[in-house]
Amino acid sequence: MKTRIRELRKERKLSQEELALAVGTTRQTITSIEVGKYTASLVLAYKIAHYFGLSIEEVFDFSDVNEL
């Protein structure tokens, strides 16, 4: 899943570690989400979006998720 996390972090001059601490996860998790190796849980996605003042859909790209 594609995300805008890296772009949003860079705009705000945040490190992965700073974002991780702010949303209660690890730097490794943020790295994995940014490179598409890990899909954030709904709770973590909400925390990240809320941190940036955006909706989940504005941060995470669901266009490649298959319909059920």
Image: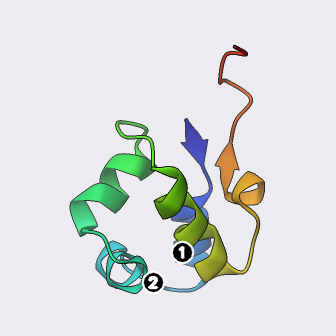
Between the C-alphas of marks 2 and 1, the distance is 6 Å
- Residue type at mark 2 is Leu
Q: Position of residue 7 (x, y in %)?
A: 59, 64
Tell me: residue 57, above or below residue 53. above
* SS category of the residue bearing label 2: loop
Which element type, helix, strand or loop, lies under badge 1?
A: helix
For the C terminus, give its image quadrant: top right
> Residue 53's spot in the image, x, y percent?
72, 80
Residue 43 in percent (x, y) is at: 50, 61
Instruction: Quickly name the residue at label 2.
Output: 14
Quarter of the N terminus within the rendering: top right
Q: Pick the residue in front: 34 or 26.
A: 26
Is 50 placed left or right of 18 in the picture? right
Q: Residue at x 41, y 85 (%)?
A: 22
Left or right placement of residue 24 versus residue 52 in this view: left
- Residue type, numbered disc 1: Lys
Residue 46: which disc?
Answer: none
Relative to 51, does residue 54 appear above or below in the rendering? above
Q: How far across and down, in percent of the image, does residue 36 sit?
A: 43, 38
On the image, numbered disc 1 is attached to which residue?
Answer: 10
Cβ atoms at labels 2 and 1 below 8 Å apart: yes
